Amino acid sequence: ATNYAEASSVFILNNNVFVGGYKRAANGNLIAMYWKNNAPFVLTISATNSTVIDIFAKGDSVISLGFTDSKATYWLANTAFEIDTDLITARKVVFNGEDMYILFSGFDTEIDNIATAYLKNGEKTIINQPSTLGLGITLNDIFISKNDVYLVGNDTNDDGNYPMIAHYWKNGKSYNLT
C-alpha cells in the first residue's frame, strides 16, 4: 500500500509536536521516521527494516528510539547509534539533565534468561530476577525525578499464573500496588 504508516509516540516541546513511527516502503520494509509539526523526517533507508517506538525532544535535539533490523537503535540529530545490548525491545527514552535512560526488555545472554532493564548512559541495570518460567516482570514506563529512578510494571503471582500484580519501583525497591 502506498499510504501505510504508524504513529507510536508523541512528545511536545515549546508548542512543537513530535510524533515517532514508521512508514512502509515500496519494497515492504518499514522506514523509521518522525514528524515535527506534520513535517516528515526520514531516519532510515528502505534497505533496512526499522521503526521509531519512542521520541523525546530536548533543546534543539530530537532523540528517537526504536530498532533497525532487530537491533536496538536510537537516533540523535538524525544519526543512528546502535545500542550495545542484547535486550532487543527498546520501550522508552527519557532524560535527566544530560543522562539518557532507556527502558528495555528481552532475552539477556548475560543471565541466560528473560530480563527487564534500563540503561543509564549505556550502563545496564537489570530489574527482575530471572524467571524459570520465562515470565516475570514487565516494565512499562520510566520516570526520573532528581536522582530517583521510578519504574512501573507488573509481575506474575508466585506460582507463575495470572492475574498479574501491579508494581512500581523506586531505585530498585519494589512496591506492590495490588
Image: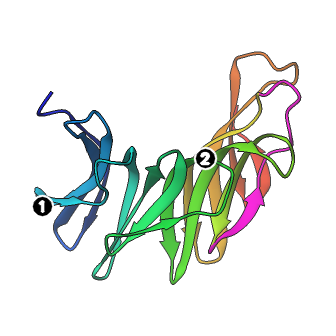
- Please name which of the two marks, 2 or 1, marks the residue nearer to the observer: 2
Q: Amino acid at mark 1?
A: Asn
Task: Give the Cα distance between marks 2 and 1.
Answer: 30 Å
Q: Please give the name of the residue rendered at 89% of the width and 28% of the height, measured from the top-left corner.
A: 132
Q: Is residue 134 above or below residue 69?
A: above
Front residue of 47/154: it is 47
Q: Over which residues does the magenta segment extend?
A: 121-134
Residue 52 placed where, x, y %? 37, 51
Tell me whether circle 2 and circle 1 mark residues in contact (CB < 8 Å): no
First in sequence, mark 2 or 1: give its number: 1
Per the picture, the main secondary structure of the magenta-coloured stretch is: loop
> Magenta span has 131?
yes
Which residue is under mark 2? 88
Q: Please give the name of the residue rendered at 39% of the width and 43% of the height, measured from the top-left corner.
A: 49
Which residue is under mark 1? 37
Front residue of 135/151: it is 135
Front residue of 27/35: it is 27
Please state if 116 lies on the left or on the right of 113 as rendered: left
Q: Please give the name of the residue rendered at 66% of the width and 58% of the height, measured from the top-left corner.
A: 118
Q: Is residue 87 above or below residue 178?
A: below
